[in-house]
Amino acid sequence: MTHALRIGRTAIPYELRRSATASERRITVTPGHVEVLALTTDNEGDIAGFLDRKRQWLFDTVREMQRITATRHAVPRFMTGSKIPYRGRNMPLTVRRSDAERVEIAYRNGFIVDLPAWAGRDTDRLVASELKLWLKQRARRDVKEIAETYSSRFDLIPRSVRVADFATGWGSCGPEGTILINWHLIFAPRKVLEYVVLHELAHLRHRSHDRQFWRLVAELVPDYESAKSWLDRHQSMLSGDFLKGTKCDRTPV
């Protein structure tokens, strides 16, 4: 339902949405759109009081979004409408302003980044850095999930499985059974990531790329040749160059 909040001579239209699962009220602002998330138990007075407390922040944020839209040619790369590679596809990015206290990222058929007020105007590096953290964490989760699914089933138990930055190559299996996987594979289709993880698991039994090794890989991944071929053709798009120069050392991977 669309409403409007009047601040001085300015009327700011907003969409009111109620949520039974939300634990707090929230305002998000994107170019041309304001959404107010309220609790199902809120009455009109609760919502009006919340908006009154946020009126200056909302006014300033809407003006900032209008400025960004008007100077779109000068807007950084990480803005609403940009495309972020993820699992073999380029997914849309939406950057919103929020009254939350920290940066929040959600994925729903695309990336949604909510920026708090303290983010200021120069948000390009911040959005890139937070996306990089999110992608590395997702890569770590996927790699561990794949390894756990197959390791016990085929009696291929690594000492540990981690993701890392690789200058070259996609994975390694150390002499003591430590497996490292290039986190950039989060940009490739899931079947390609699975192939690389299982390729390294196979090295726990066969250290060289001999006939027995490839026979085991074929048992683990019957269509491994298609994944290997995809990786050979598209390796240049998995470099993560679009995120280079960003800092992501808050959370170890």
Image (cartoon, helix red, strand yellow):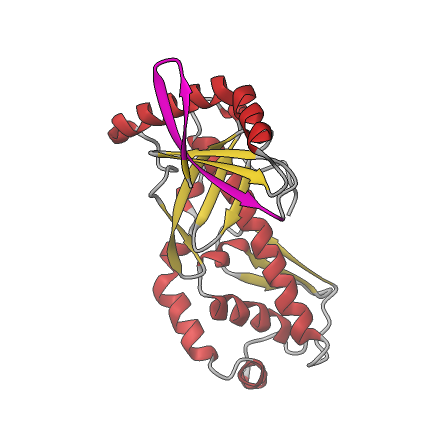
Q: Nearer the viewer, residue 36 or 97?
A: 36
Q: Residue furthest front?
A: 44
Residue 149, by quadrant, is: bottom right
Q: Residue at x 54, y 70 (%)?
A: 194
Closest to the observer, 235 or 134: 134
Which segment is the magenta one?
3-20
Per the picture, the main secondary structure of the magenta-coloured stretch is strand
Q: Residue at x 47, y 34 (%)?
A: 28
**Front-most of 157 and 125?**
125
Q: Is residue 171 above or below residue 118?
A: below
Q: Say if the magenta span includes residue 119.
A: no
Residue drawn at the location 59% of the way across and 61% of the way down = 142
Front in this rendered view, residue 33 or 84: 33
Quadrant in the rendering for residue 213: bottom right
Q: Residue at x 55, y 86 (%)?
A: 215
Q: Residue 196, image x and y in percent?
A: 53, 68
In the image, taking residue 192 as reference, residue 65 lies left or right, namely left
- Give the answer, above or below, for where 101 lies relative to 195: above
Is residue 10 one of those drawn in magenta? Answer: yes
- Residue 227 in picture, x, y percent from top left: 44, 73
Q: Position of residue 78 (x, y in %)?
A: 39, 38
Residue 74 on image: x %, y %: 28, 27
Which of the image's four quarters has the N terminus?
top left
